[in-house]
Every structure is written in C-alpha cells, then in structure tokens.
Amino acid sequence: MRTRETQSVNDIRTAIRELSTRADLARKEGRPDDAAELDRRVQYYREELGARP
C-alpha cells in the first residue's frame, strides 16, 4: 500500500484505530476476507508509524 502524501502521526493513528474497528466488525459479521484486508492495511500503517522518528 502506498500513501499519496506524507501523513501526520495523528492521521496514521486515527487510520489504525478506524481500520481496526472495521476489521473487528467484519470478523463479527462473518467476513473474514474483508477483515484480513483491513488487518493488512493496519499492519502497513503500524510499519509506517514505526519508521517515524
């Protein structure tokens, strides 16, 4: 996944929080493929956040 522009740390944290919530909902609704995709996006953002100073 590639971001179009540099995002602030707060924007990344917000994205992680929202995507995690959506992934949990997808799992509860029996949509494992959607949950897996959302989890991949969360992982990308966590890596992005970890690369920040």
Image (cartoon, rainbow, N blue to C red):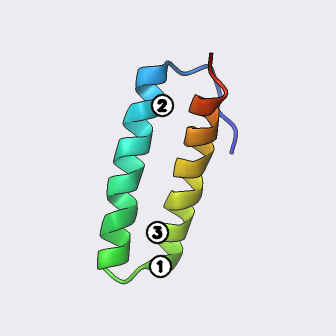
Q: Residues within 10 Å of mark 2 (few under 14, many from 20)?
A: some
As drawn, 31 above or below 43: below
Q: Earlier in the sequence, mark 3 or mark 2?
A: 2
In the rendered view, does 16 fall on the left or right side of 41? left
Q: Residue 32's x, y, as percent?
A: 47, 79
As drawn, 38 above or below 3: below
At horizontal 39% and vertical 54% (from top left) the residue drawn is 20
At horizontal 53% and vertical 76% (from top left) the residue drawn is 33
Q: Secondary structure at mark 2?
A: helix
Q: Residue 36's x, y, as percent?
A: 54, 69
Q: Which mark is residue 32?
A: 1
Q: Residues within 10 Å of mark 1 (few under 14, many from 20)?
A: some
Three-letter code, disc 1: Pro
Three-letter code, disc 3: Ala
Q: Which mark is residue 15?
A: none
In the rendered view, does 40 fall on the left or right side of 22? right
The residues tagged by marks 1 and 3 sit, at their Cα atoms, a distance apart of 5 Å
At horizontal 62% and vertical 45% (from top left) the residue drawn is 44
Which quadrant of the rendered structure holds the C terminus? top right
As drawn, 26 above or below 15: below
* Residue that label 3 marks: 35
At horizontal 62% and vertical 21% (from top left) the residue drawn is 52
* Residue that label 2 marks: 12
